[in-house]
Image (cartoon, helix red, strand yellow):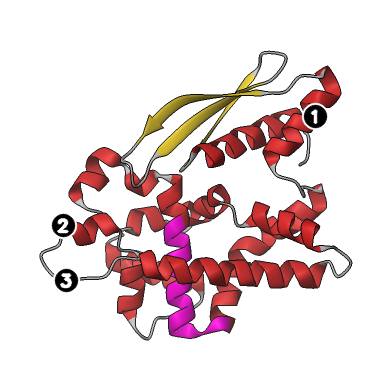
Amino acid sequence: MNRTDLLEALQTTIGHRFKDPSLLETALTHRSFTNESQDPMEDNERLEFLGDAVVNLVVADRTYALEPDWDEGRLTRLKALVVCGPALAEKASDLGLGELLLLGRGAARSDRVGQASSALSNVFESVVGAVYLDGGFDTAQRFILSQLDPAIQACLERGRLTDPKSSLQAACLRESHQTPVYQVVGREGPDHAPQFTIRVVLPDGVGHEGTGGSRKEAEQAAALNALNALGIGC
C-alpha cells in the first residue's frame, strides 16, 4: 500500500477520521525530517509531550477504577509496566507507525531511527496527542484503551506488579543467593535516538538479551525476557 492507503488504514484502526489531517502528519514527522526540510514545518515532539500526559491519565484512570482497594504504590507499579517505553514501542510497531514516520535521509538509512524503541514509543505518544487535539479526550481514551487495556488485564492476571529487574533479582537471590549481572553488548544509532542491547547473565550462566532506547529500558527488557524464559511473573 502507498502512504495514503496506510494513513487511511491507520485512521480506521484508531477509530477516528481526522478533521485536520495535518495533525496526523505532524505526529508522524520526526525531528530529523524537519531539520532537512527547506520549508518551515513542525516535528512531533510537542504532540509527544501532550500524548504522554494523556496516556498516563487514561491508564491511571483505568487502573484506579479496576482496583479500588489498591494503594498508590501498587497502582503506580502497574501503570509503569503498561506505559513503559518497550510496551508502547511494541504497540507502535503493531500499528505500523515506524513505516509511516517521516525521517531525514540520514536517520532513515544509516541510523535506523524508525526501528528504534525510543522513536517508536515517542511516535505512539505523538499520535495519541494528535487524536486528543482533533477528536477530544473520549476519542483518545477509546484509542488508548483499545491498545493498552489487554496489557493492563494481562498484568493483573499474572500478578506482575513490580518491575522486571526487581523481580528477577528477587528470584535469583531466592534460588542461589546471587544477583544477575547486566552487560552492554551493543549500542547503535545516533545520540538523539540510541538503541542499546543488554545481556543479563543469571547465576547459572544462562544469558538473555533485551533492547531499548536507554540502558535502563534495555535492562528491563532483558530481565523481562529472562523472567518469561523462567516462567516467573513480576
How far from the left and from the top, in percent, is residue 216? 55, 40
Distance in Å between CA atoms under marks 1 and 2: 49 Å
- Residue under label 3, please give it: 40
Tag 1 secondary structure: helix
Identify which amino acid the numbered label 2 is placed on: Glu
Distance in Å between CA atoms under marks 3 and 2: 10 Å
User: Which corner quadrant holds the N terminus?
Assistant: bottom left
Q: What's the residue at 78%, 25% (across, down)?
A: 172
Tag 3 secondary structure: loop
Give the quarter of the image for residue 224: top right
How far from the left and from the top, in percent, is residue 180? 68, 23
Badge 3: residue crowd in 10 Å (few <14, some 14–19, many ≥20): few
Give the quarter of the image for residue 31: bottom left
Q: Are marks 1 and 2 in contact (CB under 8 Å)?
A: no
Tag 2 secondary structure: helix
Q: Residue 36 bears which disc, if any?
A: 2
Instruction: Name the chief secondary structure element in magenta.
Output: helix
Instruction: Using residue 34 as the reference point, say whether residue 135 is left or right of it.
Output: right
Identify which amino acid the numbered label 1 is placed on: Ala
Badge 2: residue crowd in 10 Å (few <14, some 14–19, many ≥20): few
Distance in Å between CA atoms under marks 3 and 1: 53 Å
In the rendered image, the residue lying farthest to the top is 205
Residue numbers of the magenta segment: 122-137
Q: Are marks 3 and 2 in contact (CB under 8 Å)?
A: no
Q: What's the residue at 26%, 70% (across, down)?
A: 42
Tell whether position 134 is magenta.
yes
